[in-house]
Amino acid sequence: MCSSREETLGYQFWRTGFWETHLAGKPYHISALYVVDLQRFRREKVGDKLRQYYQQLSADPNSFANLDQDLPNYVQFDIKIHSLPQEWLWCESWCSDETKAQAKTIDLCNEHKEPKVSMAKRILGEKISEELDRT
C-alpha cells in the first residue's frame, strides 16, 4: 500500500484504534481493484463467507464506512488476500506526486469531496480534460 504522501500519514486510520488491533500486524489493503481466482473462490466458498461476515457486521451502523475495503480487510484472517503491486493503484490521498508516473491505474479516491470530473481533469491532465469536456 502506498504511504509516500508524508502530509497524510496522520490520517491513515488503519494504523491506530480498531484496525491496528484487529489487523495485529497484517496490512490494511487499500484497493478498488481485485484479481480473483474464480475456481478457488468457488471451491473455498468465499462468497458465502463474505455474505456471512457482511450479515453479521452490517447490523452496526458504524461498520463498513468503506465497504469495498473494510470487508476484505476484516476477513483476511479467514480469507487470504494480497495487495497488487503499488503501481496498480495510485491514490492522491496516500501516494506522492512523484510516484504517479509509474501508476497503471489511478483511483480518484475522494477524501476532500471534490467533484469527480474536476478531480479527473486536475489529476489526469489535459488529455482527459478534453475528453470529459466532449461528453
Image: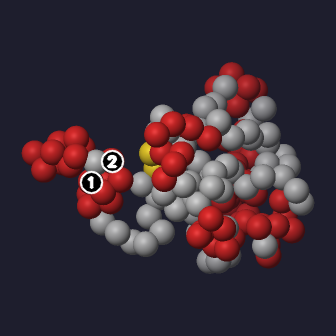
**Residue indicated by mark 2:** 124
Q: Residue at x 82, y 67 (%)?
A: 20
Tell me, yes or no, whether the two marked residues, 1 and 2, touch with CB atoms within 8 Å.
Answer: yes
Mark 1 secondary-structure assignment: helix
Q: Residue at x 62, y 77 (%)?
A: 61
Mark 2 secondary-structure assignment: helix
Image-based side of 83 in relation to 108, left or right: right
Give the x, y percent position of residue 111: 48, 69
Front one among 20 and 35: 20
Front one among 53 and 124: 124
Front one among 78 and 94: 94
Q: Residue at x 56, y 38 (%)?
A: 87
Quote the CA–CA distance across marks 1 and 2. 5 Å
Which of the 4 quarters of the picture holds residue 69?
A: bottom right
**Residue indicated by mark 1:** 121
Give the x, y percent position of residue 52: 73, 54
Name above or below for residue 117 compared with residue 39.
below
The kind of residue on which mark 2 rests is Leu
Give the x, y percent position of residue 17: 79, 76
Give the x, y percent position of residue 37: 67, 26
